[in-house]
Image: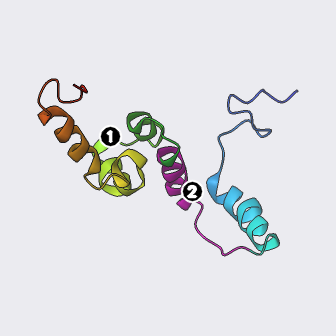
Amino acid sequence: MGSRPSPHGLPNGGPLNISNLTRRVYYPALRRAELIERPLYNFRHTFAVFMLEAGENPGWVSRQMRHTSAELLWCRYARWWPQVARSGGSRVEKWWREEMRPSGADQVG
């Protein structure tokens, strides 16, 4: 009897066992690399921060993380959104100045 193909791409035919992966692969790899042991779950945060800093669409990032709404992403990660975190109000000030400029003021007479 041959082994059945796995829909998950794993040799045992079943879904990935996170506890087994963490115990047998993840923590030993951290020790070999002489890194601090941290929960595998922390990579969710690393993923979110990297994606937002790279300018990915927050709605897409939220869906990838299986959030029920983008509100959680906003509350937790807004400080890493380049367009949000680094403006400190300067964008709205620039917009306001441009909007309030009298028509023709930018033309040299």
Quadrant of image for the N terminus: top right
Residue 48 falls inside the magenta stretch: yes
Q: Amino acid at mark 2?
A: Phe
Residue receiving disc 2: 43
Sequence-earlier tag: 2 or 1: 2
Q: Residue at x 76, y 62 (%)?
A: 24
Q: Is residue 2 above or below residue 47?
A: above
Label count reads 2
Q: Quadrant of residue 76?
A: bottom left
In depth, the one of 98 and 80 nearer the eye is: 98
Secondary element at tag 2: helix
Dot in front, 2 or 1? 2
Q: Main secondary structure of the magenta part?
A: helix
Where residue 34 sits in the image (x, y, percent)? 77, 75
Q: Hey, which residue is sitting farthest right in the picture?
A: 1
Q: Which residue is mark 1?
A: 68
Nearer to me, 9 or 77: 77
Give, as a single range, the part of the protein colored magenta: 35-52
Which disc is residue 53 wearing? none
